[in-house]
Image (cartoon, helix red, strand yellow):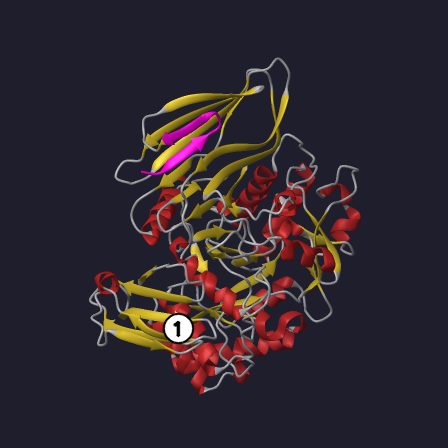
Amino acid sequence: MLKIRVESIKELILAGGREFKIEKEDLSVDYAFSSLPDSSAVLVQVTIRNVSDTPLRVGKVDLIEIQDVSEPVYYNNWQSWFPFKAYWEQPLVEPLVQFADSQGISLLAATPVPEVLREGFRPSDYFIATDELLVGFVSNEFSHQYFLWNDESSSIKGVADLFGTRLLPGESIELETMAIYGSNTLWEMLEEYADLINKKNSVEFREFEGIGWCSWYHYFTEITFEELSKNVRLLAEIREREKIDYRLVQLDDGYQEDIGDWLQTNSKFPELKEIASEIKREGFMAGLWIAPFSASETSRLFNEHRNWFVRNDDESPKVAYRNWGKRIFALDSTNPEALTYLKNLIKSIRDSGFDYLKIDFLFAGAIPGRRFDESVSPVEAYRTGMQMIRDAAGEDCFILGCGAPLLPSVGFVDGMRIGSDTAPHWNGEPMDIGIPSARFCLRNAYTRSFMHRRLWLNDPDTIILRDCDLTEDEKRIFALSVGLLDGMMLNSDDMARVDKNGIELLREAISLRGGEPRVFLDGMNGVFAACTRKASQSNVISFVNLTDTPRHSIKLKEMYRDWSGVVPSVDEVELPCRSIWIQKRRSTT
């Protein structure tokens, strides 16, 4: 059985039905362990009580330590763009910190606890796993939860940061529930964990129907109304001629006057209502990109309402991050006026005719700092803002989260980006810190596949079909992976540059959709086995190699056939670099 430690108790064999109390100076920490019915999990409920005679501020609290941990250890970052991947040794932090400092980049994109990075540790946020265990929190409502792996002591420590939450004498606070799994395979534990999150948070989401188109990865900020209109017409023609089920046209960054001034368009675009009307005229759902918690230093919103933003201790506005060549500040959703603004913003966009919202750079809403209501944690502030967006948008609006804190977003979004931005180039060797990369984007699509249809619909980012810096093999890897992993499917191209081969690749990717995927993680961050069952057309066994090294004699294991029902025609597979191998069987469902 798994062994864990808590402060002052040398060793505790993990089991349900145990309760005990730890005295920590002015705090009492109560632990209650319980078994989860029909599961291998043990739930841990921790309650913290102020046993002193004076009010206390509670920051970071060490909760448990898991011993005898073996490699690889799977680390998850708190937000969409950063990795979930395996480490065989404790991850290095210094290069990330040095790079961020040299480029003037805020560490808040990487973590809401940047001081932990500066101390030389990389946290695994919300959960952490090995091939033999998984430990994670099942909701994220007010604290930030993370885990630290020490490869020298072969241990994992679980921590909750309450960001200075104030407890009066005798007052207590019950932390979010933790689940510990110590049996089954890694992929089964991940799936069970996500199922538990789904149940705990009563998750519901809208379906994403058909195929979508996004302006970003061809036009970036150079998109114009004329080019948008041209693509709307071409997509309608392709839908009719090729019988491709295009349903969504989503306008990305490049239409707005400034970051934060979302209702004011720039000189390239008419007003939002006309943009939505142009898209809907051809029968498409109209989608719009915004970053609702962000405002640049040059925006009207920031300059007219500086008191609406998260502040430093000296009361100056706190820089959340830098982008677009500007400092970007974070909206304080605990400020009633700012929250009303947020509601009116979303309602105005909806009234303009948009029924799909891509809300980006969401981590800004959860950065630590001083807020209007100082009794509220950054996580609570974020969830307040997300609840307002969800309510103002209405149930009939599809919301896609991006650059988002993952666990606190559960229940507020219909879809979620689960990796970095892709790119019209492979970019296989950047620092793995959320920099646009087709390779790392796709890596996360595989490693976070267990979240799909449990927490939300996974958005692996867009397929690229046109001739670009991606090779034909690289485009094929990406498109077919999106299909077999059953994620949201959009492409991002000037449709005038998509030839017959591009359309056929899209058609092949579509044929793989609708299955129940399982990714068999084995510590390899660039080579994956993935199988599907219960697909609309074909169940598959597949291998993908995202690396620059060929892989030889990959065994077709019995568990792949058991999951998919596909009987392989070979015993071993040769997998060239940057390639995908697929064997199909007609689905009977």
Task: Give percent across and percent down for residue 85.
Answer: 47, 57
Q: Which residue is mark 1?
A: 480
In the structure shown, which secondary structural element does the residue marked by tag 1 occupy? helix
Q: Circle 1: is it few (<14), some (14-19), or many (20+) Cα within 10 Å?
A: many
Left or right: 420 in relation to 332: left
User: What residue sits 49% from the left and 77% below the top?
Assistant: 235
Query: In which quadrant will I find the N terminus?
Result: top left
Please state which of residues 160 and 118 is positioned toward the viewer in this rendering. 118
Question: Where does the C terminus fall, quadrant-wise?
Answer: bottom left
Q: Is residue 148 above or below residue 294?
A: above
Q: Nearer the viewer, residue 196 or 228?
A: 196
Against 318, residue 94 (above or below) is below
Identify the residue at image location x=46%, y=42%: 155
Q: Is residue 457 shown above or below 337?
A: below
Q: Can you give x and y, in whole percent of width and height, for residue 130 in the image?
A: 40, 50
Q: Is residue 395 above or below residue 377?
A: below
* Quarter residue 340 falls in: top right
Q: Nearer the viewer, residue 197 or 343?
A: 197
Residue 461 seen by the camera? no
Q: Is residue 258 left or right of residue 124?
A: right
- The image quadrant of residue 383 is top right
Depth check: give the residue in front, 487 or 45: 45
Look at the image and tell me whether residue 348 can be seen: yes
Q: Amino acid at mark 1?
A: Leu
> Does the magenta portion include 4?
yes
Span colored in magenta: 1-12
Q: Main secondary structure of the magenta part?
A: strand
Q: Position of residue 387 (x, y in %)?
A: 54, 43
